[in-house]
Image (tube, grey):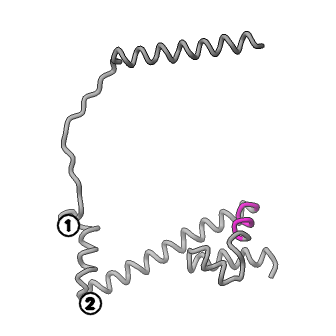
Amino acid sequence: MNEVKTKELFVEQLRKTPIIQVCAEKLGVSRSTFYRMKRSDKKFSQKVDEAIFEGRQMINDLSESKLISAIHSGNLTSVMYWLNHNHATYSNKLEIVGNLSVSNELTKEQEQDIKRALALANIKEVRNDKQK
């Protein structure tokens, strides 16, 4: 199979199963060969990224469909999962309360640190000028 055909089949497979290892095994291509092709061909790389995105969207749709079917059949775990992720009352949340004050003034220690850093930078600059 030539490289052009391999690339076409890779993109097609990634739309169905957005997992590179699975597609590589199905096509009899090593992962390193896939990544070499992706690195060397920008159009292929873009098509791969788009195919993976489309494949993930398809898997997400399928997963939601299965989850909703499980909810309809009374699966309590599925019901709890849905509520935790889609209903504010049942979601896991962390509430942090406090006050934050911001000061634009430097402490004496911070001022000293800045002066030392500037002095050190100035010394290095002088040395570099002398070496030229």
Q: Residue at x 24, y 78 (%)?
A: 79
**Residue 92 at x, y percent in the picture:** 24, 62
> How far separated are the C-alphas under marks 2 and 1?
21 Å
Q: Quadrant of residue 124?
A: top right
What amino acid is at disc 2? Ser
Which of the 4 image quadrants contains residue 20? Answer: bottom right
- The residue at 61%/12% (across/down) is 123
Question: Residue visible at 69% across and 66% down?
Answer: 35
| Of callouts 2 and 1, the N-terminal one | 2
Q: In the displayed structure, would residue 74 be above or below residue 33?
A: below
Mark carried by residue 90 = 1
Q: Give the residue type that dot 1 points to.
A: Tyr
Q: Tell me which segment is drawn in magenta.
A: 34-40
Q: Quadrant of the C terminus?
A: top right
Mark 2 and mark 1 residues within 8 Å of each other at the beta carbon: no
Whether residue 95 is situated above or below residue 66 in the rendered picture: above
Is 34 or 72 nearer to us in this picture? 34
- Quarter occupied by the N terminus: bottom right
Residue tagged 2: 73
The residue sitting at 60% across, 71% down in the picture is 51
In this rendering, the answer to whether 46 lies above or below 121 is: below
Q: Which mark is residue 33?
A: none
Q: Nearer the viewer, residue 85 or 114?
A: 114
In this view, the residue in front, 61 or 113, is: 113
Q: Quadrant of residue 99?
A: top left
Q: Is 85 colored magenta in this rendering?
A: no
Where 24 sits versus 47, above or below? below
Left or right: where 124 falls relative to 41: left
In the rendering, at what x and y percent does residue 11 appear? Answer: 65, 74
Viewer-closest of 97 and 47: 97
